[in-house]
Image (cartoon, helix red, strand yellow):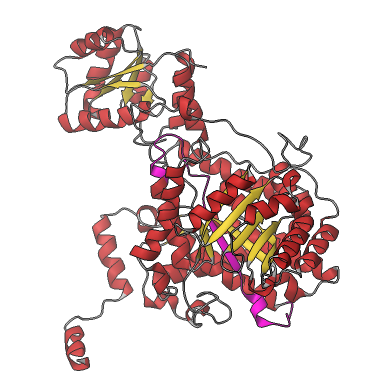
């Protein structure tokens, strides 16, 4: 068999990278390779269109095995993960019934979100009735000020039930940096309070009581390299400050759970989790822990909020599915898939069932849990892993040089950096350099969403606010937020502007430009009236006016605009807004004649549509 393979492969002469590049350059016909095919990411490095074996020679990530330091290939020798579903606890009996129900539907990890004012022994007993804490991972998220109390209640409950505490696993989610990052409030004396929680957590050896939540950065629109770099700095801040306070580094490290977000950047996310385990292992090892297992990162992954949309919300299913796939392939410890309707209402039974099944499909149908680190050895993923690690490590060192994560958060510098990334990505969405299907591209023309939106806003303390912020907080505006506000304004205005496509001339160009223009204006919720074509611009204009058009869009070829645009503009005579689809060479001549509205692939879609809303009297 080996001989046959040798003969087969000997038929094909090896092709060098230089030969590939020569062929690509020839096919590009003069267009620069760097400009046309190299992906300029927002992560601080560029990605080539192809990689070869020579690109991974000497990389450290290819040397270790799963379960071996530095854990780039995973902290365990299998790829199974916990399937988590979170429950917002408003009624403890109801939450208990729901938990028992979903445990029979494939869930292996429960996440309880509880208001701090509701933490007491009776409520926790009601919540956990009938649930075996030795068999199910239990995760609790509540006010930081109630975390120590909650740990004591759980310990007493488990002992009263005769549970083997050594076999119980879960997390408490104590996060000393939530206040400054999310609420813009100072977190004075956080070290002392965190030490107390850590000491209390010793009674629950299988629980991670400290949370590092880089998912905040993900949901605030950070780039992946930022999420990773700041996560490392955050974790190191806990190690440094708590060991200075007298805590054992092994205990600190083993009590940290990282809660990462997952964006839709498929391969980059796989690389992120691989790089995260690697770099975190190196950081912890530098503290010389008594147990090497302290270097293992415990990583939970939750699908992103930033790219979820209200309009065409079922597309959220596609986004969260690829996100869950990235995390599963990368070998995380547990995953939460957000229900697709989370952006506009309290998720219902249907959306929660779908979210559960998205993970179960990966396990039961695709068998993702059967193969450890399947991306290992991929030239592309290995290069991404090392590139991300390099950029994130530099960011980590930069934060350390400036005094550490705590100092930078207190100064609001990390929040400002992430918010700047959000702003840059929002601009990319506005100009369609970043696509959110159904929001800034290919919207559902007939969809309305105002009536389905539920307004809910409370904090974990049970109140409606936590006072005025004193430092910069993260901006959690989603990528689609401004487009949604634009379209909702149209819905709520009580009038739907009509956009009429005056298609004429070159068949291919008029069809292409009418489709482009239809998608363009539909993003604002306008009614689009498309046409097969007119023999004269005058006929098209009159048809548009008769149809009650507020905006008339001329769709033709660049060569024909010099003739058609002035004629159509004159025939329209101000009875509607006049727009030319494209950026013809004669644009300046047309502007000189008063034609000053053009839409094309370089347009800022959001700002253009905002301007039309203003012209049409939509607030």
Q: Is 99 positioned to the left or the right of 104 in the image?
A: right
The residue shown at (42%, 41%) is: 436
Magenta-span inclusion, residue 300: yes
Q: Position of residue 65 (x, y in %)?
A: 49, 82
- The N terminus lies in quadrant: bottom left
Q: Nearer the viewer, residue 349 or 226?
A: 349
Residue 603 vertical position relative to residue 294 in the rendered view, above or below = above
The residue shown at (69%, 74%) is: 284
Quadrant in the picture for residue 94 = top right
Q: Position of residue 346 (x, y in %)?
A: 53, 38
Magenta-span inclusion, residue 114: no
Q: Is residue 213 visible?
A: no
Q: Position of residue 343 (x, y in %)?
A: 51, 38
Quadrant in the picture for residue 225 = bottom right
Going by the picture, which residue comes out furthest to the left? 535
Q: Is residue 159 visible?
A: yes
Q: Nearer the viewer, residue 252 or 461?
A: 461
Residue 602 vertical position relative to residue 174 in the rendered view, above or below = above
Magenta segment's dominant SS is loop
Q: Which residues are magenta?
A: 287-316
Q: Position of residue 314 (x, y in %)?
A: 39, 41
């Amino acid at each position: 068999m080996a001989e046959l393979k040798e003969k087969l492969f000997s038929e094909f002469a090896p092709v060098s990278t230089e030969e590939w590049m020569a062929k690509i350059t020839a096919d590009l016909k003069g267009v620069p390779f760097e400009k046309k095919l190299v992906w300029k990411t927002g992560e601080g490095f560029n990605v080539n269109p192809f990689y070869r074996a020579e690109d991974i020679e000497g990389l450290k990530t290819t040397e270790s095995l799963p379960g071996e330091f530095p854990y780039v290939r995973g902290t365990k020798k299998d790829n199974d993960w916990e399937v988590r579903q979170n429950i917002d606890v408003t009624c403890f009996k109801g939450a208990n019934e729901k938990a028992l129900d979903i445990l029979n539907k494939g869930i292996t990890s429960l996440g309880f979100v509880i208001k701090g004012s509701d933490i007491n022994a009776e409520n926790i007993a009601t919540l956990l009735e009938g649930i075996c804490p030795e068999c199910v991972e239990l995760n609790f998220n509540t006010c930081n000020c109630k975390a120590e109390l909650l740990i004591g209640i759980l310990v007493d409950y488990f002992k009263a039930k005769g549970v083997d505490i050594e076999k119980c696993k879960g997390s408490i989610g104590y996060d000393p940096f939530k206040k400054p990052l999310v609420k813009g409030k100072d977190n004075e004396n956080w070290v002392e309070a965190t030490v107390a929680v850590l000491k209390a957590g010793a009674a629950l050896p299988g629980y991670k009581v400290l949370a590092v939540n880089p998912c905040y950065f993900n949901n605030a629109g950070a780039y992946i390299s930022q999420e990773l770099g700041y996560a490392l700095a955050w974790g190191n801040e806990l190690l440094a400050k708590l060991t200075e306070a007298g805590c054992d580094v092994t205990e600190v490290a083993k009590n940290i759970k990282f809660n990462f977000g997952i964006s839709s950047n498929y391969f980059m996310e796989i690389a992120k989790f691989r790089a995260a385990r690697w770099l975190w292992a190196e950081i912890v090892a530098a503290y010389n822990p008594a147990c090497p297992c302290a270097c293992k990162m415990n990583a939970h992954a939750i699908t992103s909020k930033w790219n979820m949309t209200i309009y065409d919300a079922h597309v959220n299913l596609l986004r969260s599915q690829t996100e869950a796939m990235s995390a599963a392939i990368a070998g995380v410890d547990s995953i939460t898939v957000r229900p697709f309707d989370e952006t506009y209402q309290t998720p219902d039974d249907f959306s929660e069932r779908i979210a559960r099944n998205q993970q179960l499909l990966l396990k039961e149908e695709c068998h993702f849990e059967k193969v450890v680190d399947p991306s290992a050895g991929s030239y592309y993923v290995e290069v991404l892993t090392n590139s991300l690690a390099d950029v994130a490590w530099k960011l980590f060192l930069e934060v350390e040089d400036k005094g550490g994560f705590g100092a930078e958060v207190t100064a609001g510098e990390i929040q400002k950096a992430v918010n700047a990334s959000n702003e840059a990505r929002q601009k990319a969405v506005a100009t369609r350099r970043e696509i959110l299907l159904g929001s800034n591209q290919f919207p559902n023309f007939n969809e309305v969403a105002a009536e389905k939106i539920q307004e809910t806003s409370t904090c974990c303390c049970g109140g409606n606010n936590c006072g005025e912020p004193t430092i910069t907080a993260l901006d959690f505006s989603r990528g689609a937020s401004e487009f949604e506000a634009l379209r909702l304004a149209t819905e709520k205005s009580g009038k739907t502007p009509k956009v009429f496509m005056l298609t004429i001339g070159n068949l291919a160009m008029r069809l292409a430009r009418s489709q482009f223009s239809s998608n363009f204006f539909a993003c604002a919720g306008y009614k689009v009236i498309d046409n097969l074509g007119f023999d004269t611009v005058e006929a098209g204009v009159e048809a548009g006016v008769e149809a009650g058009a507020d905006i008339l869009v001329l769709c033709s070829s660049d060569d024909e605009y010099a003739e058609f645009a002035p004629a159509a503009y004159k025939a329209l005579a101000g009875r509607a807004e006049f727009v030319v689809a494209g950026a013809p060479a004669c644009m300046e001549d047309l502007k000189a004649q008063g034609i000053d509205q053009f839409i094309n692939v370089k347009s800022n879609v959001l700002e253009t549509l905002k301007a039309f809303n203003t012209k049409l009297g939509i607030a």
